[in-house]
Structures are given as C-alpha cells and as structure tokens.
Image: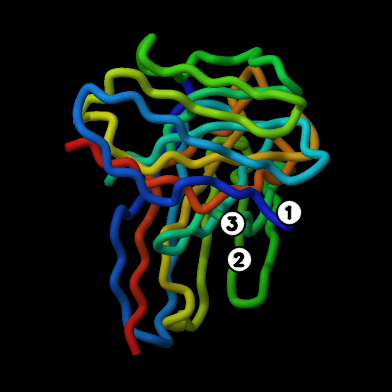
Amino acid sequence: GAGVSQSPSNKVTEKGKDVELRCDPISGHTALYWYRQSLGQGLEFLIYFQGNSAPDKSGLPSDRFSAERTGGSVSTLTIQRTQQEDSAVYLCASSLKASTAYTEAFFGQGTRLTVV
Amino acid sequence: TQLLEQSPQFLSIQEGENLTVYCNSSSVFSSLQWYRQEPGEGPVLLVTVVTGGEVKKLKRLTFQFGDARKDSSLHITAAQPGDTGLYLCAGANQAGTALIFGKGTTLSVSS
C-alpha cells in the first residue's frame, strides 16, 4: 500500500481478554516499530523489528505484551489478559533503513485500544 | 537515560502571532527530528537537523539545532489555523534502534 496501515482503528475489549493489533508497513521497509501513546505521555517505544527479528524489545512493559513479524512484512502486537492501564493508542511505524537517526519513520494512523 | 523535554506543553495563540517551542536534553544526539501530529493521525516528519548550529527553514517554520546537539527549537512565523496540532521532537537512542520522543507541544491557533 501507499502508507502504513493499521487495523483495527478502534478496539474496545473487556479486562482480561487478549487482543491482537495488526500493522502492514510500507512495502520494502525493513525496519518496523511499535509505539504506545497515552494522553499526556508522548510516544513510548515498545519494540523494533529488523526484518523478522526483534533486536530491541526493551520497551515492552510486561510479559503480557508480545509481537511478531512474518515475511519481513506484516507485524502483530498481542496483549494478553488486558488491563485498564493498557488503554492507549498503539502506533506502528516503518522505515526504509534501520538507522533511525537520519531515516524518516512513517507512521500508521494507530489503533485506539480501550479496556473496560 | 536519554530524555527529551519539550516546552511549553500547551500553546494557544491567535492567527498571525509568532511562537517558539523548545526541545531540550542533557544528552547529545547525532540528530533531532521534528514531527507534527494531527488528531486521529500518526506523526508526520517535518525536518531532520543533523549538524550542530544548523538552521533549516520550511516555509514559515524555522528549525534550529543547538551547537552542542543537546537541544532544538521550532519557530513559527505568522501562525495560521492550519498549524494547529501536536509538535513532537525525537532523537535516536544510543543503540540506534528506536526514536525517543518528547511529550510534545500542543499548539492551537485560532482565527
């Protein structure tokens, strides 16, 4: 596609349920990132993929969070046993190269997750 | 820990006014980026500044990178309602595996 696509755009789930968030990066972009944006908190880094491997998972807040990327393309972020504090907008970004210092990151529109 | 502090957090001005927002850190960054985010959308890159002391202009927006590469500023001349949005500065972490973002400046320009 022309840009980074995320689905669903909105997700309301009950506390304790598992959710899966999907990201389709720009074709040919080898680097993929997940961020979380809460009100007043800015963008919080979660995980970085280079191809199908994740050399930096340091931002995942707990073992309830996991992510995978297949075929060097689509990525799925899974949150198990959701809690109310997981409510946020989850943003996916991709870039052509791994070097984030000089490379533009292209963001999707995000998935707004609400845990009730 | 690398942190980017942005100020002010909120700014509400009238059309035609000038404004400056700041991005500061105690850490040195190889470059800093500025993104703009509108409601319901993801951030979009405005500019990357790479060299200490560098000044870049994008129409009415002027970006400056501090000489020591620890801070940056964004100046908007004659703000317009279309400039309304969340302005975020970002820099690469030391491992080069992610962008660290400031909390942003929410700008509202009314006509």
Residue drawn at 66 percent across, 76 percent down: B59
Q: Which residue is mark 3?
A: B44
Report the side of A111 relative to B74 (left or right): left
Question: Foreground residue, B50 or A38?
Answer: A38
In space, the residues marked 3 and 1 are separated at their CA atoms by 17 Å
In space, the residues marked 1 and 2 are separated at their CA atoms by 32 Å
Amino acid, disc 2: Thr
At which x and y percent is residue A77?
49, 27
Structural crowding at the residue carrying mark 2, measured as other residues with C-alpha within 10 Å and reported as few (<14), some (14–19) or many (≥20): some
Label 2: element kind: strand
Q: Nearer the viewer, mark 3 or mark 1?
A: 1
Residue drawn at 39 percent across, 86 percent down: B15
Q: Nearer the viewer, mark 3 or mark 2?
A: 3
**Picture quadrant where residue B8 is located:** bottom left
Structural crowding at the residue carrying mark 3, measured as other residues with C-alpha within 10 Å and reported as few (<14), some (14–19) or many (≥20): some
Using the image, determine if residue A90 lies above or below residue B95.
below
At which x and y percent is residue A20?
44, 30
Q: Quadrant of the N terminus of chain A?
A: bottom right
Using the image, determine if residue A89 lies above or below residue B108.
above
